[in-house]
Amino acid sequence: MTRQLHYWQGSFIDDAEVAERLAELPTLVEGVLAEPLSTETVLLACDTVSQALREPDGDLHARLMAQQTGTADGPDRAEAAATLAELADALARPALERKLRRELGGPRPERLTRPDARETRYEAWAPVGLLVHIAPGNAAGVAPLSVVEGLLAGNVNVLKTSSTDTPLAQHLLAEIAAADPTGAVGRRIIALRFSSRRQDLMRLLCAPADAVAVWGGEDAVAGVAALVPPGCRLVEWGHKISFGYLTRDAWTDRAALLALATDVCRLEQQACSSPQVVYLDTDPDADSPSQLFAFAEEFAAVLDEVSAKFPTPSSGCGGAEDGADPAEQAELTTTELVARAEQHLGLTKVLAADDGSWRVFADTRPALTASPLHRTVWIKPLPRRDIVATLRPMRRYLQTAGVGGNRADLAQLSRTLFTAGVDRITPLGAMLDGYHGEPHDGVYALQRYSRRVSVQAPEAAFTTTPCLDDLVAPAALPAPPTGPLMDKAAAQAQIRTLAPEHAQLYFHSGGTTGAPALSVFTCDDYDTQMTASGNGLIAAGFDPAHDRAANLFFCGEMYGSFISFFSILERLNATQIPIAAGPDHEEIANALVTYRVDTLFGMPSYLWQLFHAQGDRLRSYGGIRKVFYGGEHFTSEQRRILTEEFGVEVIRSAAYGSTDLGPLGYQCAHAQGTVHHVLTDLHTLEILDPQQDRPAPVGQPGRLVFTTRTRAGQRLERYQIGDLGRAVDGVCPCGSHIPRIELLGRYGDVFRMGTYHFNYRRFTQVAEEHLGYRGELQLILTSQADREQLTVRLDGAYAPDPEAARTALLANIPELGSAVGPEALLACTVETAATSAFERTPTSGKLRTVIDRRTTAS
């Protein structure tokens, strides 16, 4: 029966098909690369598999265990389970996002954005194209994880594993492909399994490659290098040598020796980071060879103790070198015989276990010597002053140094060892350990699997374009989630279960609709959100290169507006004067004049007060050209006044967002009223029917439900933010394909009185259109003994006669006219007051638009 050894874009094939398909590889690659791949698609697929692998009783775990242990030369169950656990950790979304941030600068590196917001120059990381992976045979997890790195960089990936390897890589990659419902990931994965001696297949594999990543020794790398075409990037992950380095204090530190011996025994020194040599920081003028030999005896005793705790892997051959193949056994024997012969010259001392399970070779010569592995280690002297001269000639082969010493030793030796060519320094006992995002062999893999591309665009035409990709097509988004809807209570309950590393920044909401609620973020989450919001500001017309911005949002009591916009402007490299809102309008106006501020950020109600209190002062030096607001909205009449009387040229939303979700949308230069583009880089939006949990008809108002996709900490999925809105069809006149919504107010803006439903926005609209009213408006709901009472509060500085205002409202809001008619279901009055008498939230300064006191009325 033909064996299905190879995975090819979604299905398994046999040997007979491989050559034929490889011949068609160049044409296949061109078609696949024409389809963009979002890193988010890769992250979702990998995280799905990661979660399944964490269930030891699950179906996926059982199937992949069988793929590893189903052959005679496969690992035992404990080793196979450890491999799956490592893969589960490496494939988890937080780990991969950390890798993207470290290596490519952010979670969406494929996007053509402006690295310097002050310039219309765009850069992105693009795939090299066809990336071939020639995998090693001594690390089962390396092969599939290398392909995942290639996927994160957007490449078409062809993996070749040895014919003697287990099919773990092929089947794991098939699972990752199956976890992507779009099929885009699967179309970028080919995983083959054949011997490198099949030169016909190797030539077909390498000929069309844009980059080849190869693991192995010099001969293996040279063999692949001979097959790659000119201009192909050869990424060498060759064999490396690692060592321990002990200062004098560490020589006698038993804990340090136990840790180092553990590094020797783990993985039988098969990892590049396994120590093959132990160097002692000796004094050539005072220390004698006898001290070196004495240390070797002490370390041999420790190694014997530790080795007994690590079962020796069996190759089925038996004998002292159990686990080594015949060639390796020959090298072990030869190396030991030579070292024993040199004992007679006083150069070496050989210590070995009776059963051959470990060996210690002490050598008075400091030159770096490779170990024959299998728990065999050299002990050599190396004064720190000689480190560079001794090791630098071998710099191509150096990787990890495990250092034992005090804090000052570590600091000094790190610089010296880096100069000698070492790439990586760890504590003893941690030489084989790593961390997510760690460089490998002195480089970042994702950068070697990518190209940095750039576009220089004419400034005049692209000043308000933060990302070139948005002018082409809407971003590809995953399918909307289908789980239960979340409300604020569920979000608050979730916070109490977060791990400490997921709760690094704490914010309180403004409390407009109730008591302030807590929201938490990781620092990375916050950075991603502020960067996205900064791009939105560019689209809104903020010019980081020329505008001089004053941050007049409210600050304090854990409220996030001031802090967030400080961070946003900082990331835009903009000029900012962080004043914050305060009661002394004169002092703030003086600061604006002194620092020549021409752009304001703040709450509409506060800015409105400032303009009217200090209008003459603000006009005296050329005035404010731009206003970016948040938290509330300016009415069209207020916009007219700011434009005609105060000379403001641009009035736009600084961001649409919330404390718990962060920024949700932005206005562009063509946005009208409350229309915003959705920040699809961060969130998925659903618009649900106001009354039922189903999608609202296209273009009709509905509840806005957001799922945040870029939060490593608090995960808010299908979160009902409390806002109403509708989708706006078509491509925006600004050219962006990012979807738009029109905000229609909050649930609380719609209230029921006297059997009728009313919308706060209708009151402001009538007051503006029929009364020419330009001030703030507040509704107060109370209960009387026989009916409900609606009080409309207007700013006395702008309000007409209260009775005239009441008449206009009754005439132009039919429901209100009916409710206060003959049946007298509702009493309605209009009152005027100074703006200081209007009720506001103490934290954010927002106007409380609808104040419902009926629940507490007697």
Image (spheres, helix red, strand yellow):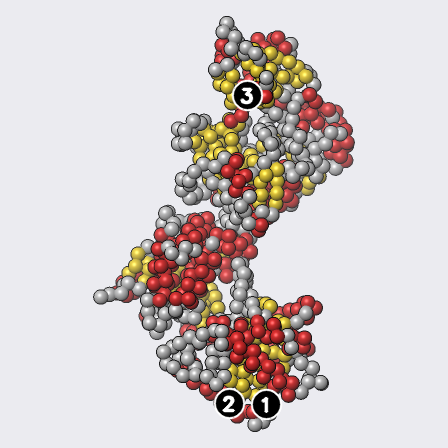
- What residue is pinned by disc 1? 347
**Nearer the N terminus, badge 3 or badge 1?**
1
- Cα gap from disc 3 to disc 2, whole angstroms: 92 Å
Secondary structure state at the residue bearing disc 2: helix
Instruction: Please give the name of the residue rendered at 56% of the width and 36% of the height, measured from the top-left corner.
Output: 658
Instruction: Please give the name of the residue rendered at 64% of the width and 77% of the height, measured from the top-left corner.
Output: 251
- Cα gap from disc 1 to disc 2, whole angstroms: 11 Å
Mark sitting on residue 338: 2
User: Splitting the image into 4 quarters, where does residue 749 fall?
Assistant: top right
Looking at the image, can residue 127 be seen? Answer: no
Q: Residues within 10 Å of mark 2 (few under 14, many from 20)?
A: few
**Nearer the N terminus, badge 3 or badge 2?**
2
Looking at the image, can residue 581 be seen? Answer: yes
Q: Quadrant of the N terminus?
A: bottom left
Residue at the far top: name it. 822
Horizontally, residue 385 falls left or right of residue 244, namely right
Instruction: Please give the name of the residue rendered at 49% of the width and 73% of the height, measured from the top-left corner.
Output: 309
Q: What amino acid type should be assigned to the residue bearing mark 3?
A: Tyr
Q: Position of residue 418 (x, y in %)?
A: 62, 70
Is 29 situated above or below 645?
A: below
Mark sitting on residue 760: 3
Q: Are marks 3 and 1 in contact (CB under 8 Å)?
A: no
Q: Quadrant of the C terminus?
A: top right
Secondary structure state at the residue bearing disc 3: helix
- Cα gap from disc 3 to disc 1, whole angstroms: 92 Å
User: Splitting the image into 4 quarters, where does residue 556 fall?
Assistant: top right
Horizontally, residue 808 falls left or right of residue 268, namely right
Q: Are marks 1 and 2 in contact (CB under 8 Å)?
A: no
